[in-house]
Amino acid sequence: MTVCLSSGLVLMVFLMAYVIWQQAEASVQKFGWTFIFSSQWDPVHERFGALPYIYGTVVSTMLAILIAGPISMGAAVYLAEFAPRQMKELLAFMVDLLAAIPGIVYGLWGSFVLVPFLRHYFEPWLERNLGFLPFFQGPPFGLDMLAAGIILAIMSIPVITAVTREVLETVPGSQREPLIAIGATPWEVVRIGVIPYAWDGIIGAFTLGLGKAIGETMAVTMVIGNEPKISASLFSPAHSMTSVIANEFAQAVKTLHMSSLIHIGLILFGLTLLVNVLARLLIYKMNWRVKKR
């Protein structure tokens, strides 16, 4: 029975991929691989390219992981290794609660709190002090890739923290005891004995956070600016694959326009599937090592 249910889930994934491919077929046949590398998006003349949306997705996601990574790692290490039991239970509950908040709520918070803060305070400060870098040039709008990256980071932190904490807690005591016996400090025990052993699982946790960031829709749509352009500046409005689908799907009356949006969805589906499969394989490898010992 379990095998049948598992096979059914796998079949559902392949069926979903087939349906998306079927709906995107008109765009695939007309544009082929040029769809990925073209920057033109003109529904009137039916010329479509996904490069600005892929670029916006990749940049905002990488920015989110760069911000969320150190924070999540520090929080997970504290919860798994240093936090008192009562504090650990409370903080772990808060992390799980943050992971359960809908994306639209994060988007509203971003629109009314984060965006004005970036526009009036943080981005002008970055421009004054780091304006010699191409990443921090241009007028500070607030609705831009920086806002999208920060929102995605906030949404990814609970996922990465929760999974990393669980991975660290599965590390056997045999990794800690020899270091404690020779007088290592608690931080040295974590740095030398725990983190290297759990590295595959930690990478898996980060990959799951990456998958969360790639697939987020509403929060990103509300703060990224929704302008299909490629710019090195994080102050520049942009578009993501999810945001363009959310914005234009209802207005896509022509077959090729609709097919092109679904073509973007097909690329997003494949990318998200790849990231999540990789994460699961890394976590499975970590658990297998623990059981083997």
Image (tube, helix red, strand yellow):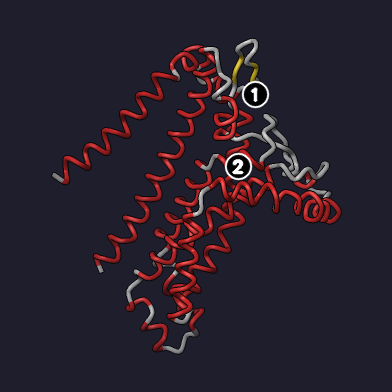
Q: Quadrant of residue 236?
A: top right
Which numbered circle lies on residue 220?
2
Question: Circle 2 sits in a helix, a strand or a loop, which is it?
Answer: helix
Left or right of residue 95, residue 106 in this image: right
Relative image position of residue 275 (x, y in whole percent): 44, 44
Which residue position is annotated with label 1?
A: 39
Question: In this orientation, which residue lies closer to the viewer: 227 or 167?
Answer: 227
Q: Nearer the viewer, mark 2 or mark 1?
A: 2
**Amino acid carrying mark 2 in the image:** Val
At x 48%, y 78%, the residue is: 87
At x 48%, y 62%, the residue is: 161
Relative image position of residue 209 (x, y in whole percent): 49, 52
Where's the C terminus, which quadrant?
bottom left
Left or right of residue 182, residue 10 in this image: left
Label count reads 2
Question: Circle 1 sits in a helix, a strand or a loop, which is it?
Answer: loop
Where's the N terminus, which quadrant?
top left
Q: Are marks 2 and 1 in contact (CB under 8 Å)?
A: no
